[in-house]
Amino acid sequence: MKTETINFFDKVYQVAKQIPYGRVTSYGAIANYLGAAKSARMVGYAMNGSVGKDVPAHRVVNRKGLLTGKHHFEGTNLMQELLESEGIKIIDNQIQGFDKVFWDPSNEL
């Protein structure tokens, strides 16, 4: 079981590393791409464990474009600041124009 979890996390990291600058995807989109459509929460756990792995975890948000994982980043607003530095507009933890910046690995990879 533990080996499967590590392998799944590594697959999540491989996908997340391909999210282009200035774009975002969702936990569910990554899970769906990996053939594990019901594993969005596991993708979230992977993002939480990605510190030090050179994974752009700030580019992974929930299906509505909400920064639900921001409390896992250092500081109070680091996730938002990183996204804004890439040109993504955020109001009240919500990505504005989410459909325009959304990157779907199932269509792009």
Image (spheres, rainbow, N blue to C red):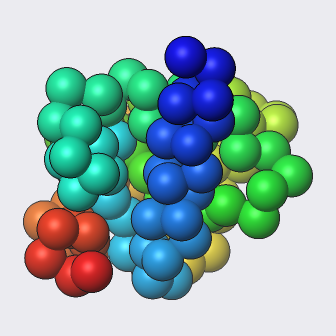
Q: Is residue 81 above or below residue 94?
A: below
Question: 104 left or right of 42?
Answer: left
**What residue is drawn where x is 17% and y is 36%?**
37
Q: Nearer the viewer, residue 101 or 20?
A: 20
**What residue is drawn where x is 49% and y is 41%?**
8
Question: Where is residue 43 drawn, in percent x and y?
Answer: 44, 36
Question: 7 left or right of 36?
Answer: right
Q: Quadrant of residue 72?
A: top right
Question: Where is residue 71 drawn, in percent x and y?
Answer: 64, 25
Question: Where is residue 104 drawn, in percent x and y?
Answer: 21, 67
Q: Nearer the viewer, residue 83 or 108?
A: 108
Q: Quadrant of residue 83?
A: bottom right
Which quarter shows the N terminus?
top right
**What residue is drawn where x is 71% and y is 44%?**
50
**What residue is drawn where x is 53% and y is 30%?**
4
Question: 107 left or right of 1?
Answer: left
For the question of whether residue 73 can be seen, the reply is yes
Which quarter shows the C terminus?
bottom left
